[in-house]
Image (tube, rainbow, N blue to C red):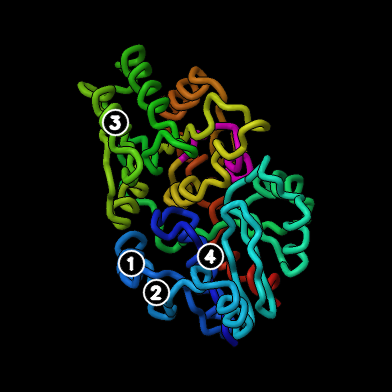
Amino acid sequence: MKAAIYNPYFDTLGGGERYTLTFANGLVKLGYEVDVFWDDKSIGEKIKERFGFNVGSLNFVDNLFAKDKKTKQRLMKIYDLIFFVSDGSIPSLRAKKNILHFQVPFHGVGGRSLLNRLKLRKIDLIVCNSFFTKKVIDKEYGVLSEVLYPPIDVDSFKPLKKENLIINVGRFTSLLHSKRQDVLAKVFIKMFEEKKEKVRDWRLVLAGADREGKEYVSELRKMAKGYPIEILTNPHFNDLKQLCGQAKIFWTAAGFGFDEEKQPEKMEHFGITTAETMACGCVPVVINKGGQKEIVEEGKNGFLWETEKQLIDKTLELIENQDEWLKLSEAAQKRSLVFSEKKFYERIKKLVG
């Protein structure tokens, strides 16, 4: 059997690209020979460096979707299955089985146009990365999608010797999908100034790729100067895993200051890093928006916050109460298993058939 994978965002290599590649490996496990469409043939090495990901079983071939329409339609027919990551548009797919994946809750894009409805007739399955994304996509395109949560390598993300460390991991950008590291830096500084005796031996690390946000990073460095805040840009995947293993608390703020109903694209669509850090025994204190609410259960395996004061108060609660931190840390590790690669592969098998 022959399958093809296309993701238009491989040049960013974020969580969505890990999702796509793990799906590809799931198809390999089911007996498919898998082609990945991408013109830059060095992508395999970049993936290995960024994710520590074994891509030896995948074939990286010229992007079929960059070819002319006639050639494209002819070549698509050789595939038993195509997995296509949407950029908001609906592609014309011609494999025996066509799967369309949405990582972003696109809205207001004319999803129910006549042309889209005609193209959707050729789509056998629509998959979203969370129920948050599904709700928006189903309404926008008039479809009934399935949810396939992103996979977490729970065997790779493990607790290490813990330090008084709060971390956030996410791409540095002030554009469409900002992780709002500026909010986290501001809150940590406020907490440090007002509760110095309680947090003086704690530090905050903000880590992520800065390709789209070098100016943003520069502003963050100015803000953090003089405080125990480290801005870590473009870290190796193994270094990130070590940070997650050492940290006690994980923070997020993506979507802060935005309306979840009117601007769903500004939210964390799922929260892969949240689940990864939970596997490491980090207690998540994450914003009560987007897909985060599907991962963290308030007071059971972490905390959800809506105001900066809540973020400070709930963080201080963990800092001051070691027993509560330990209880939630153990519960967070258990919760992360729901999003394991094993569960992901089992779900692929059911969806693909």
Mark found first going from the N terminus, 3 or 1: 1
Magenta segment, which residues?
A: 283-295
In the rendered image, which residue does mark 3 sit on? 203
Kind of residue at badge 3: Arg
- On residue 328, which mark appears? none
Kind of residue at badge 4: Glu
Mark found first going from the N terminus, 4 or 1: 1
In the rendered image, which residue does mark 1 sit on? 48
C-alpha separation, residue under disc 3 versus residue under disc 1: 30 Å
In the rendered image, which residue does mark 4 sit on? 341
Q: Residue at x 40, y 57 (%)?
A: 13
Q: Looking at the figure, which quarter contains the C terminus?
A: bottom right
Magenta segment includes 284? yes
Mark found first going from the N terminus, 1 or 2: 1
- On residue 55, which mark appears? 2
The kind of secondary structure element at disc 3 is strand
Mark found first going from the N terminus, 4 or 3: 3
Residue 55, x across and y down, in percent:
39, 74
Q: Looking at the figure, which quarter contains the N terminus?
A: bottom right
Q: Residue at x 60, y 56 (%)?
A: 149
**Circle 3 crowding by C-alpha within 10 Å: few under 14, some 14–19, many from 20:** some
